[in-house]
Amino acid sequence: MTAHRGPGSPAFNVDAIAARLEGLEETIISKLIDRAQFRRNRRVYETGKSGFPGEKKRSLFELRLLWQERMDASFGRFHVPEERPLYGRLPEPQRHIELGRTGLCIKDFNVINRMPAIIRAYLELLPNICRPGDDGHYGSSCEHDVYAVQAIGRRVHYGSLYVAESKFRSSQSVFLPLMKKGDADAIIEKLTRKEIEERIVRRIRRKVVAMQANANPDVRHLIDPDVVASLYRAVIVPLTKQGEALYLLNRKV
Amino acid sequence: MTAHRGPGSPAFNVDAIAARLEGLEETIISKLIDRAQFRRNRRVYETGKSGFPGEKKRSLFELRLLWQERMDASFGRFHVPEERPLYGRLPEPQRHIELGRTGLCIKDFNVINRMPAIIRAYLELLPNICRPGDDGHYGSSCEHDVYAVQAIGRRVHYGSLYVAESKFRSSQSVFLPLMKKGDADAIIEKLTRKEIEERIVRRIRRKVVAMQANANPDVRHLIDPDVVASLYRAVIVPLTKQGEALYLLNRKV
């Protein structure tokens, strides 16, 4: 482990982490825009309606995510700390993955896994980005759903791990007592920077506008910048902070 | 078959087809931008270096595409005319797919399959959108490669099928004699509309600019709008016209 790396270690430089988080924003926005080109397609999310023979417990969306995670696991995706799967018991990687030291001080990255909450929030978001109705494009819809939740997951988990470790290194005296007490709420309060969060939300809004500025609304369904801004404010930012608290509460001191 | 549908049939309305093709442009651009966030990573494309045990013939990119196509086949993707796979002998769909009548008059959609040429052109494009070097993100690189070639394939094959059928319906007397002679070059010449092609290329360029306008170049690698414009001019448009000619030469008259 590399807990002896100082707070100035490049991997935990606050600006570098913020830059990486900012760089993930376009990816999230473009995945949501891609999904919005298809109708709501409720059937995709209904249990037992996947059409897969004998499959009674899962929706087509859940099956697609499971198959994607099995493939991704074989290619080694979940060795990367910020790539967290929804499902357990996935196959081992077929390739040897050279990760290098992450500098993170936690035994099991899955203690910060927020995928169930991300997926719940995403499914609630769908009616706000897609037009209602059914266009029969079930395969494309769940394909893009999977890419969108993976993009959101990467952002939430990257923040949960690296922001938390960085803040711990720069403010041990603030966080250590709260970690010892196991006080998640107090940790979240200390992690909160309202003005920075609002700056992120405004930037997201601007990016959604810009990324659609040259799209022809007759041929593309445009999404409402405020909806994505709200997703950041109400879901992505709070889930990241919860993940940071989980990291700190489970950090090997 | 629905060859008796008139040229005015909504599925073969020129404007509707052009609109659908235009709507696919943002998807292609955003996939290329996503890939460009990673380095060139040559190793991903080298035969036998995938790290998969016993896999000597394929690169990591080729393996990822094969696994993706196997999964997609199980979900029914290749029942959609414009979704063409690179690989043969893929699994049968697990779900029953309701396609509805396409109105296309061709027995095997794979006669217009341009995937090998698309992939060759894409791999040649990579050094022009990615920074050189190796960042170790092999899994992410080939994941985004696959999404990019699928997006380009969808555009090329949609055009090949629907533009060709539409032009046939509106100008049978022009195309029938050339189809009987099997004269692909003359067909391609008749399909060529230089001014429309240049308008598409200019629009692509503008979209690449707009979609990156609010990205922070310190945290995102931006791609050159001219590179994507050239991809359209030198690859996507010509391959689509070749696919249209293949469609017409194999059309059930």
Image (cartoon, coloured by chain):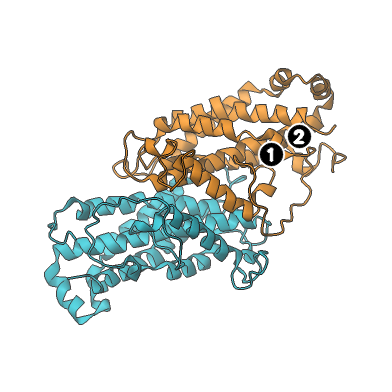
Chain colours: A cyan, B orange
Examine the image and state in which quarter residue A6 appears.
Answer: bottom left
Q: Find residue B166 and name its label.
A: 2
Q: Amino acid at mark 1?
A: Ile
Pointer 2 with pointer 1, Cβ within 8 A:
yes
Q: From the image, which quarter does the C terminus of chain B lie in?
A: top right
Looking at the image, can residue B211 be seen? Answer: no
Q: Position of residue B180 (x, y in %)?
A: 83, 22
Q: Earlier along the polypeptide chain: callout 2 or callout 1?
A: 1
Circle 2 — which element? helix
Residue A59: numbered disc: none
Marking on residue B17: 1
Q: Amino acid at mark 2?
A: Ser
Left or right, B211 with reference to A180:
right
Name the residue rendered at 37%, 42% in the picture: B37
**Position in image of residue A38 (x %, y %):** 61, 54
Q: Secondary structure at mark 1?
A: helix
Tell me which residue sits at (71%, 29%) in the image: B246
Quadrant hosting residue B127: top left
Examine the rendering and report whether any part of residue A200 can be seen.
yes
Mark 1 is surrounded, within 10 Å at the Cα level, by few (under 14), some (14 to 19) or many (20 or more) other residues, namely some
Image vertical order of residue A17 relative to residue B2, above or below:
below
Q: Nearer the viewer, residue B50 or B174?
A: B50
Taking B226 as reference, is B27 left or right? right
Q: Residue furthest right?
A: B4
Give the percent coordinates (x, y) of residue A226. Answer: 45, 59
Numbered disc 1: what chain? Answer: B
